[in-house]
Amino acid sequence: MSDPIITFDHVVKEFKVRGRKSGVARAVDDVSLTINRGDIFGIIGYSGAGKSTLVRLINALERPTGGSVSVLGTDITSLSESKLRPIRQKIGMIFQQFNLFSTKTVAQNIAYPLQLDHWRKDYQDRRVAELLDFVGLSEHADKYPSQLSGGQKQRVGIARALATNPEILLADEATSALDPETTTEVLTLLKRVNKEFGITIVLITHQMNVVQQIADRVAVMSAGRVVESGDVYDVFAAPQQPVTKRFIATALSGLPEQDRVERLHTEWSGRIVTVLIRQKDVSDSHGREVSASGQNISELIAKHGIESGLLYGGIDTVRGSAIGAITYEFKGDDARVNAFLAELAENSDVIDFGTAANPVPYDEAVSGYTPEHAPIAPAVDAAKANAADQNNEGAQA
């Protein structure tokens, strides 16, 4: 049974902006969202989407202009600073740039929130030792931040955030400054935090692959709104919105990037088509059932007598189920290829990049398909929606 720990109810957050005709910018726009206890919940969006502002509403560093925010069963929307203090003590924070004190040692950085909380010195020492062991930095206790790698600094940040035994951990772009290998190590540590301590983690990021590796559920933000949310596998496997599809393109194994598609067009004259592989049926963000994808490719190739060649591909596992993409070259007369792709699109997600002679622009192809009923040529409306989405994000940046 779900146990809400954070609830946004029609939340709006506006800021005054000089020089703007309306005088205000809406960073969060009518957001209703529930995060359950024990979740690792990803909030993803491009720069300016409103995700960091939304998270700052959780610890009341920002106050909503409209709507309400409940944390740990308490409506914090209008609480005084004194009444907020005990709630904030249950919320830890991890930052992109670590925010460590350069003049304090590793142990002193971790002990800092315990000092603010007036813990006894022997309790502080014991807690710091426990946390240093947990994050694997016991031998670095007396070093200074300048002597540590980026990954080690973030481990110190995680230990400090855990010092006062929080129930919620907010991680704002916590891996953006790290290389891929170190990112994986930090995410593995955060998984341990969630599993061993039962701490709810809210992860703010613009990196879809981070969400893929760690999150249980995800919300996608664009121009201050939550445009899509749900189980991570469902959102990956059946994205509905152009912004989500562009994110998926950055993380989904086997989906070729733009320059690779251009290279394929120079090497192969046929129709370059990517078929998404979805192992199981899922529910989209509107609760509609979307069937598995890519399960009958070979059967349809044989049925229509299409020439085919496998050019690129890959499969990942997201929350225990396979998802990925395979890119083919399909050749034959246009009528036969179109009939084949139309039937394939009835039960699979098809991303059609066109031919070398008549290529489909990459962004249109990736953001224009519709799960389970993909258009053979992406609709003009999808391209317009994509462009409008990018403009909105730019206005919020």
Image (cartoon, rainbow, N blue to C red):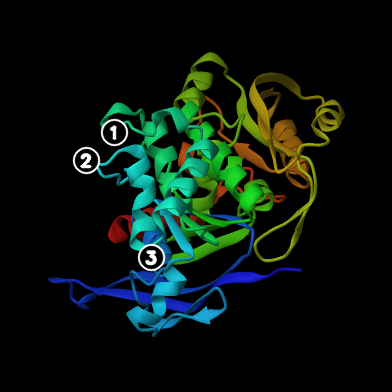
Q: Position of residue 229 (x, y in %)?
A: 59, 61
The answer to which of marks 1 and 2 sits earlier in the sequence is 2
**What residue did someone put label 1 on?**
144
**Count of all numbered marks drawn on residues in the image:** 3
Label 2 residue SS: loop
Q: From what the image shows, is residue 31 above or below residue 325?
A: below
- Specify the quadrant that holds the N terminus: bottom right
Numbered circle sitting on residue 56: 3
Farthest residue to the front: give it. 122
Q: Amino acid at mark 2?
A: Thr
Regarding residue 365, the answer to whether it shows in the image is no
**Residue 354 locus on image (x, y percent):** 56, 32
Q: CA distance from mark 3 to mark 1?
A: 29 Å
The local crowd at label 3, few if under 14, some if 14 to 19, many if 20 or more residues have their Cα within 10 Å, is some
Q: Residue at x 44, y 27 (%)?
A: 139
Residue bearing the label numbered 2: 103
Q: CA distance from mark 2 to mark 3?
A: 27 Å
Image x and y of residue 372, in percent: 72, 50
Q: Residues within 10 Å of mark 2 (few under 14, many from 20)?
A: few
| Quadrant hosting residue 58 | bottom left
- Horizontal relation, residue 292 to residue 180: left or right: right
